[in-house]
Amino acid sequence: VSGIAYVNGLFLPIEEARVSVEDRGFQFADGVYEVLRTYNGKIFAMEEHLQRLARSLDAVEIKNAPSSLMLADIIRDGLHRSQCKEAVIYLQITRGVAPRKRDFPKHVEPTVVMTVRELEPLPDEIRERGLRTITMPDNRWGRCDIKSTALLANVLAYNKARAAGVDDAIFVGADGFVSEATAGNVFVFDGTRLNTPPSGPRILSGITREKMLKLAPELRIPAREAEISVETLKKAHEIFVTSTTIECVSVVQVDDAVIGTGKPGALAMRLREEFLKRVCET
Amino acid sequence: VSGIAYVNGLFLPIEEARVSVEDRGFQFADGVYEVLRTYNGKIFAMEEHLQRLARSLDAVEIKNAPSSLMLADIIRDGLHRSQCKEAVIYLQITRGVAPRKRDFPKHVEPTVVMTVRELEPLPDEIRERGLRTITMPDNRWGRCDIKSTALLANVLAYNKARAAGVDDAIFVGADGFVSEATAGNVFVFDGTRLNTPPSGPRILSGITREKMLKLAPELRIPAREAEISVETLKKAHEIFVTSTTIECVSVVQVDDAVIGTGKPGALAMRLREEFLKRVCET
């Protein structure tokens, strides 16, 4: 069986990997994480992911975590041991274990947890029909730029969307502007330009989001960060969502509005094609 | 040594109590909790706490958790085994263990964790000098009425307050109204009446908050739920914070404003005295 876990220096089967009930990650969501993936067994954008992890650790003041270099070694080691053909790597660092108190504990070692599992790609039939979505008030906390494990709002919104018979929710702020999907960034083509909500505390700026913002102009598709109203969203020629695991996938419905032709758009397909080409070249 | 843990049916030393790294409580903050305490070895307001836990479980759609009756047995059993003289009981229920995906897993059993430790009461010197606080923008998520473990915002605010040399932070919403402290409800005496922010999605309505709202009128102190602006807060005759573990403790400073005489107020002392009297009578 492929797959492996890592906990504070030890590799072990995922089923045996455990943390203390007094880990602050468990009791306070006092931790941050990254999800990485491979292409042809090679880790995609490891440096960018580890840089973002370092920023998250810094933002929540978790000190003494292993360096990016050490984490890179752990990831590569885990990937090798996992025997996965194509892997999804989940890496989580928490503030560590201490009797439950809000105070940052003194003299505590961060908990480092990793799981490496066989990647389950988005099913082709979903990619080919495109995502159906509903909008939902963005009720998440004010620091969505920190990739923390305080994800209950995302989990509840996603499952509410699923219960409503659609594939995902798109969060909309109290000001009427789109922030992101429950686990990916939103891009909207308005007929002229590709727009994506500006980076800042209201979104987690994805690695794939950043790559698409660079890639689009190279394909002569004007792209920019800009606020997107719900009205603009629903009148879009094309919408797609990006993340490391799904790359870029079209949205064909938002609430009652059909987007474009109701089928995945040409822009998203073109961008993904070029994105994958470059991934495999590096 | 006193203290004990419980994990899914088993009692064991706290240091040995563990959960899977793929527990959704650890990876998504997909769980809820309660903190209970004893007076003279007797559990305070167990029924109210378990009712609130049931509401939290319901709000996040965690099904198949043990019934309140079963949880009451587990708590009493744990308290007995812990050999604590005066205990703080932490009870957490998560959605359970599953490979990491946002979807609510099917056929999963909730994880039930409890720790019972010797209670560390608020030091007398802090109670006697009163809390110094600073206000902070309430950047928590929109469902603070759910007692979930997605507490990173609270943890960061509390530690920011401590780093600023004070005892706690008081959250203020974008509309300028007070919501709560980082782990307790806020009461403000304006010279005529005791006011506390209305129950609703912006606050976790504490058991002690509810008891105080009933107790005050019996002592001929008019009390009500009402929005409290920062200006009203800073001009208060008296402020106090309530929670199960601290009962009711005076706030003597908010940002640069000294509250009342700068010493704990008479109202808070009177209410706590009467509160304790009734606790011990039941």
Image: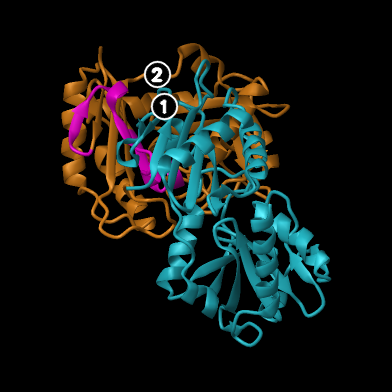
Chain colours: A orange, B cyan
Nearer the camera: disc 2 or disc 1: 1
Q: Chain of mark 1?
A: B
Q: Chain of mark 2?
A: A
Q: Secondary structure at mark 1?
A: loop
Residue A58, position as x, y percentages in the image: 33, 56
Vertical side of A22 occupied by A59: above or below: below
Q: Residue at x 63, y 88 (%)?
A: B261
Q: Residue furthest bottom?
A: B261
In the image shown, does A188 or B104 lie closer to the viewer? B104
Residue B36, position as x, y percentages in the image: 55, 48
Residue B101 visible to an observer of this rendering: yes
Residue A29 visible to an observer of this rendering: no
In the image shown, does B85 or B37 lie closer to the viewer? B85
Vertical side of B170 occupied by B89: above or below: above
- Read off the residue under disc 2: A121
In the image shown, does A192 or A169 lie closer to the viewer? A169
Q: Residue at x 78, y 59 (%)?
A: B214
* Labels 2 and 1 within one chain: no
Q: Secondary structure at mark 2?
A: loop
Q: Identity of the amino acid at label 2?
A: Pro
- Read off the residue under disc 1: B100
In the image shown, does B79 or B172 lie closer to the viewer? B79
Which region shows up in magenta? A8-35
Q: Residue at x 23, y 54 (%)?
A: A64
A19 inside magenta stretch: yes
Label 1 Cα neighbours within 10 Å, binned few <14 / some 14-19 / many ≥20? some
Q: Residue at x 33, y 52 (%)?
A: A57
Q: Identity of the amino acid at label 1?
A: Arg
Between the C-alphas of marks 2 and 1, the distance is 14 Å
Q: Quadrant of residue B281?
A: bottom right
Left or right of A162: which side holds B199?
right
Label 2 Cα neighbours within 10 Å, binned few <14 / some 14-19 / many ≥20? few
